[in-house]
Image (tube, grey):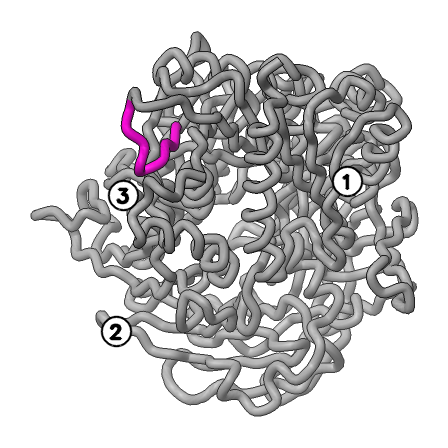
Amino acid sequence: MHSSTLTPEQSTNSADFPRQFARSRRFSLGVPRHFTVSPDGRRVLFVRTVSGTDPVGRLWQYEDGAERLLADPALLVGAGSGAVPEEERLRRERARERSVGVVSYATDDAARLVAFALSGALWAVRTDGGTPFSVPAAGPVVDPRPSPDGRYVAYVSRRCFHVVDLTGDDRQLARAEGPEISYGLAEYAAAESMQRSRGYWWAPDSRRVLVAKVDTSPVERRYISDPADPTKPPQAIRYPAAGTANAEVTLEIRALEGDRVEVEWDRKAYEYVVAAGWDAHGPFVTVQSRDQRIVRTLAVDPETGATEVLHERTDPAWVEITEGTPARTASGALVLPEDEGDTRYLTVGGQRVTPEGLQLCAVLGVEGERVLFTASDDPLETHVWCHEPGHGLRRLSREPGRFTGAARGGTVVLAGLTPRGNEAGVLRGAGAAGAAGAAGAAGDPPYQTLTSLAEEPLITPRPVHLTLGERKLRGALYLPSWHEEGTGKLPVLLDPYGGPGMQLVGRARGWFTCVSQWFAEQGFAVLVVDGRGTPNRGPAWEKTIHGDQLGPALEDQVDALRAAAAHCGDLDLTRVAIRGWSFGGFLAAAAVLYHPEIFHAAVAGAPPTDMRMYDTHWKERYLGHPEEQPENYERTSLIGHGHLLSRPLLLVHGLADDNVAAAHTLRFSAELLAAGKPHSVLPLPGATHLPADDAVNAQLLYFQRDFLMGALEEGTGKD
């Protein structure tokens, strides 16, 4: 590290950043999120902690230009005194939730009654005044949701489905028949890989509920123990590894009076329940075949449970799931994605409403005939758009960034990452007006910012955005703030994710850009590249990795490195390291295995080294069924190729990880040892896929820096 070239302030900031990064939970604390807009557009509900280091979420309401605290767990008698139910803990793990207190909530249709759970207790508050009040429940509460009319609250307790009125009159509508049965919860594959986090949906009349029943008895059992505490018994979990049985998911319509109707479809042919809902046109469900090449949207007869195919999508590779779809407008027009060529279109009633090159990302909501959605016409940005007959297509977010939002009653909430960090604001009168944005330019509808209490990072990212190589890979190069061009060569650190579902390169300041800049301040030239398989560059780009998740992804990192070195002569290609977590960790380990002539050291965090051990829906999407296409798993897995290692490699893994099991690292390490390949392993006792301990998260950055600097300075790249 070139500390002598830093000013005292820069040196202090660089040294303290990892601790700030950890205590702020990746700068997520103090940021407004989880927005709900009232039907008249006057009120906005959201969750936010009271500072950038306070982890306790509170419920807030924004109205008439002012924010009002609706629920503070610290002021509620008995709140937080109980343990978080296991089902809720798992739900938070799937959502990568980093806070406590009020972490989620749900409202009635009028956004007048809000329900939330605190340590298994059911609480509610009315938004028109008054204090939060507890609602008696039959047991520990998970995922409470008020009925549309606000008279009842549904919830899950001990895997059983309940409905209670506000006086405490509780009805158990569905009782779990055994320890492997649950009602109203999303199964692992849905929550982790399908973007479906919920397991029940109210009817608009508040008299019936569409409920998912999950039977995990066919699913492979795994055990997670805590080696740091040998007195603690192991925890059994059901994990559907690639090629093995999935949970059996059925749907039932349960009436408050006790009647039950089972939804009928060919569950053998379509075993995945991707999405479901109930609107003014009735209940609906989207199901998917095991090979993921067919997706059907079904209308459900609420009286008989019979289904009718409303729409079918097919794809020779896989049908990509688009969050928020299907949906229906007031007239009943289906809102769906459609892939053709290199564009994912938004369709309404079978008609494309977005142009070629504008990539649909997610549907945020439907109000009347108006559809709010996110889309990208530039891989570096994601914007909120609106389509409405008679008004056409309009982009609502204006300045650079990655935005999402919520809308109702002519009001739009715009939130996301901008070049200044996390920001959120309320855009009034955006319903029938012309294009509007967060800039607040003359003639725009009024825009009011919601206060963010997040900490300002001690490190200021200074990315140089590059378009690299013949595939026009999007990259960002971070150089030390103290470095002067042409004054010396810098060791290079690649810092990718590089896989499906995540982009790291964009015109926005996120926690990952701050981390990349911090590594740059330590003396690296840091290169971040989104290669083939990453989202928002079209279906053809995403599906290049079909059958091979490793080859194209690794090739893109290599090509980008060479192109970046041609652009910036200060990159020292004799000293190149790579680091990453999850898919990025897999990519880092693969880099030193297969290209030791290019990559001289690597840190691989939570790497999936054996693709057969990852979950069915995610892995079979890209590699097929392991019994039918075993060569894809052999080609992509690192297991079986450990003998190739010739460079320093640090493997890091949480021992309580239930997503990428610690067995991935432990088995790979055993293979490396048997082959006589020196390497390092850093186990994290008690840590899941997203380590939660602040001290661990801070020290991990220092530890990685020291390992990589040491490996490169030992001259491992100068052979």
Residue type indicated by callout 2: Ala
Quadrant position of the C terminus in the picture? top right
The span shown in magenta is: 477-485
The location of residue 618, given as percent across then percent down, is 70, 34
Mark closer to the chain start, 2 or 3? 2
Name the residue that disc number 1 marks: 265
| The label number, if any, that marks residue 411 in the structure image | none
From the viewer's perspective, is 26 left or right of 638?
A: left
Front disc: 2 or 3:
2
Query: Up-down: is 433 above or below 551?
Result: below
Of the residues shown, which amino acid type is indicated by label 1? Trp
Closer to the eye: label 3 or 1: 3
Q: Report the disc number at residue 396.
A: 3
Tell me the residue at 79%/56% (across/down).
213
Disc 2 target residue: 66
Residue 436: image location, x then y, percent: 20, 45
Give the main secondary structure, helix, strand or loop, of the magenta stretch.
Answer: loop
Q: CA distance from mark 3 to mark 1?
A: 40 Å
Crowd band around label 3 with a 10 angstrom C-alpha radius: few (<14), some (14–19), many (20+): many
Question: Residue 33's image quarter?
Answer: bottom left
In the displayed structure image, the side of residue 21 where residue 434 appears, left or right = left
Tell me which corner region of the image, top left, top right, bottom left or bottom right, holds residue 377: top left
Q: Residue at x 56, y 24 (%)?
A: 533
How far across and how far down the image is residue 141, in percent? 69, 74
